[in-house]
Each structure stands twice: as C-alpha cells, then as structure tokens.
Image: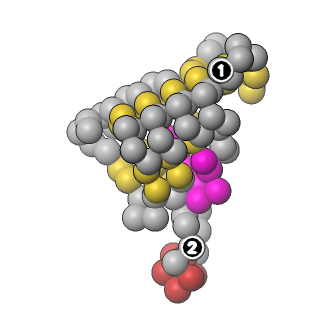
Amino acid sequence: HGTGLVIGETCKIGVRVKLYQGVTLGALSVDAAAARETRAQRHPTIEDDVTVYAGATILGGKTVIGRGSVIGGNVWLTRSVPPETTVMIGTPTLRMVSGRGRVDEEK
C-alpha cells in the first residue's frame, strides 16, 4: 500500500485491492458517541479487485465501490459506484465510465 493512507475503523476492504498514496477512506459527519454505541458502519466498503489512485477520497458508510472498479487520482466520492466502473476527474465534471462504455457526468 502507499504512504499517507487514512482507513476508517469500520471500512471493509475486499481482496486484491490496490490503494495508492494519500487515499482516504473516511466517514461523513456523524455523532461520534452514537456511532460508538451502535457500532454502525461509518466508512465505505471497497469490493474485490478495486484500484484507488493517489489522493482519492471516498466517504460514507453507505458508499460501496463495486468489484473491479477504478477510482482515479484526486477523485472525491460520497456515493456508490457500480461494479466495473472507472471514475475520473473531467473538466469541470466527474466522469463515470461503466464496463459497457456508458459515460455519466456529474457537475
């Protein structure tokens, strides 16, 4: 793994996952006391065979990065990504390319 990783305590990471330097797998804003009591998942789930490039930030306990996906460098995600999807920064949008070649853009 790379240096400078931040991996939240309730994060779930599959097998053959590559995390490059400066990646953050964190929580969205939560009530810390309530989270400790319920042991709720506050951090993302990264499924098998995912690659997350340098500087990417993935937040939230309901966020799931689907199997075989690629998250580009410096991408900021707070929502789930379907399996076999590539997410990259475009100008001025975030681009998601599914394994079938469909492109979704978010401004």
Q: Which residues are magenta?
A: 55-64
Q: Which mark is residue 27?
A: none
Q: Is residue 75 magenta?
A: no
Count neighbours of disc 1 (C-alpha within 10 A) and say few if under 14, some if 14 to 19, many if 20 or more.
some
Q: Which quadrant would residue 24 be assigned to in this image?
A: top left
What residue occupies the far bottom of the structure in this picture?
A: 37
Q: Is residue 63 magenta?
A: yes
Q: Amino acid at mark 1?
A: Gly
Count neighbours of disc 2 (C-alpha within 10 A) and say few if under 14, some if 14 to 19, many if 20 or more.
few
Would you name the residue on which mark 1 appears?
99
Residue lying at 46% horizontally and 56% vertically, measured from the top left? 12
Q: Main secondary structure of the magenta part?
A: loop
Q: In the rendered view, does 49 fall on the left or right side of 78?
A: left
Secondary structure category for the residue under label 1: loop
Q: Quadrant of the N terminus?
A: top left
N-terminal of the pair, mark 1 or mark 2, is 2
Q: Which quadrant would residue 88 be assigned to in this image?
A: top right
Could you say where residue 77 lies in the image, as x and y percent from the top left?
Answer: 59, 39
Q: Is residue 60 above or below residue 73?
A: below
Q: In the rendered view, does 103 fall on the left or right side of 5?
A: right
